[in-house]
Image (tube, helix red, strand yellow):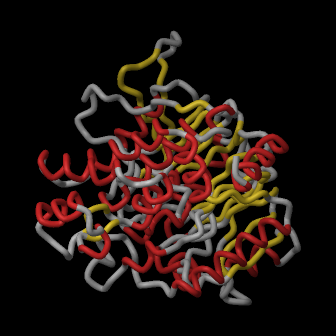
Amino acid sequence: MNVYGSKTKDTLTQCGVGVQSESGKLDVVLMHRPGQELLRLTKDNLHQLLYDAIPNLSETHQSHDIFSQYLRDNGVHVLYLADLLHETLASSDEACQRIIDGIVANSHFDSQVSTVLREWLNRRTPEQLATAIITGVGGSKDELGTSEIAQTLFEMSNSSNDFIIPPLPNLLFVRDGFSIIEINVFIWQMTEPARRNEPLLLRTIFQYHPCLSESGLKIVEWSKKDGDFSEHSTIEGGDIAYLGNGVLLIGCGERTNRAGIEELALTDLFRRIIVIYMPPCRSYMHLDTILSSVGKHAFTLHSPLAEIMEVFTVENRDSNGNLHSNPKWISHGSSVPEALKKLLNNPELIFYDALDTETSTSEQRQCRHNVVCLDDHHVVTYAGSDSERGIIAQMTSDSSCRVGLIPPQGLYEGGGGAHCMTNAIRRRAK
């Protein structure tokens, strides 16, 4: 095993795996340090690839490195997704074939071009295959190469402008593709076509990585494949907050839909599922853009939405304990603070926000409600908040919270914050 593989093994052996809460001590986290995939962004494909602006890659690296170093300085072990993918593909021919099969299945090509694409991919080394799925492959001779099969693929794909394999610039937001809850791994079904290869990559890592596959983690097949649900089921990790003790908080909006939540409920793995219905728009694409856990008794909450989002519990069993074929949705009103205080049996819950609506709106647009907990009441978010009226000032006013600040430059152009860019591999109970 190479030096990276040894580091992964040592980290997992020392710390273990499993996520028992959203705000307990964070021991091991997965991140993705972006690379050449960000250079694929242009003014023409920007919105198709789900970015608001083109980041400067040098700024991205600088800001991301500051973030990851802050985590290390505070006792968090950082694993990188690209390292895990390289380790996986280098150690398993079956994993390589799984990636190839998935890329071909997710492509838009007809059967003839797909056959040629498969042959071209079969000639890639594991390292080249890892680069291809993350960075993407353009339809030019320069990228495809000079071999006969490359020439055939170039001619049959009939375009030097489109991607043969689309890039994955949103891997920066590694939160969205999967969640570990206790020892269960959920690989989510994502809404946007630009992200369709992310679950493929993540499933391959958890199924075939030489350490993770033997760690005790278990992939949960949560989504039905028999078409029972009329609506295509989607869930993304930015909408997921596991509060511990079998209680799941989940957002329903632009990226996670009702069908996905109902399928998740039917796994019968949760004691209680609490759903917050959000406005279905990009500004509030995930729950963590408006509400994030700060600690055992506190959340951030974008107050302009606090009294207009309906809260539900999703019940999957009847009074006799029998599993419902169609889970029941029970409303608890449209006051998020009051509903959560009641449902979590915690009347002392604290909700942090800026002092006024205008400042809260500005902070939410700059992803400062999107915080990641390192431990109880120790969080990280973007710097630049209003020093008097902003959310950070309110969180730290009585020294109740410790807030680490990272630069947003090169990171927030994709619409995500600190919570989005991290995903726990090991986190303790509250």
Q: Residue furthest right?
A: 399
Instruction: Indicate left or right for 401 with 119 as reference.
Output: right
- Vertical order, 225 against 350 (above or below): above
Q: Where is residue 196 in the image (x, y as percent from the top left)?
A: 35, 53
Q: In the image shown, does 221 or 41 lie closer to the viewer?
A: 41
Horizontal side, residue 73 vs residue 412: left or right: right
Residue 121 visible in the snapshot = yes
Task: Where is residue 164? Give x, y as percent.
Answer: 26, 63
Residue 409 position within the rendered picture, expressed as x and y whole percent measured from the top left: 58, 86
Q: Which residue is drawn at 53% across and 78% down?
A: 412
Query: Could you tell me which residue is drawn at 20 percent across and 51 percent down?
Result: 116
Q: In this view, does 15 lie to the left or right of 334?
A: right
Rendered position, 396 above or below 266? below
Kindly identify the residue that appears in the image at 68 percent across and 62 percent down: 372
Q: Quadrant of residue 160?
A: bottom left
**Nearer-the-camera pick, 250 or 120:** 120
Task: Residue lying at the far top in this picture: please name it.
Answer: 320
Q: Where is 194 relative to 59, above or below?
A: above
Residue at left 56%, top 74%?
367
Count the marks: how many? 0
| Residue 354 seen by the camera | no
Q: Nearer the viewer, residue 330 or 157?
A: 157
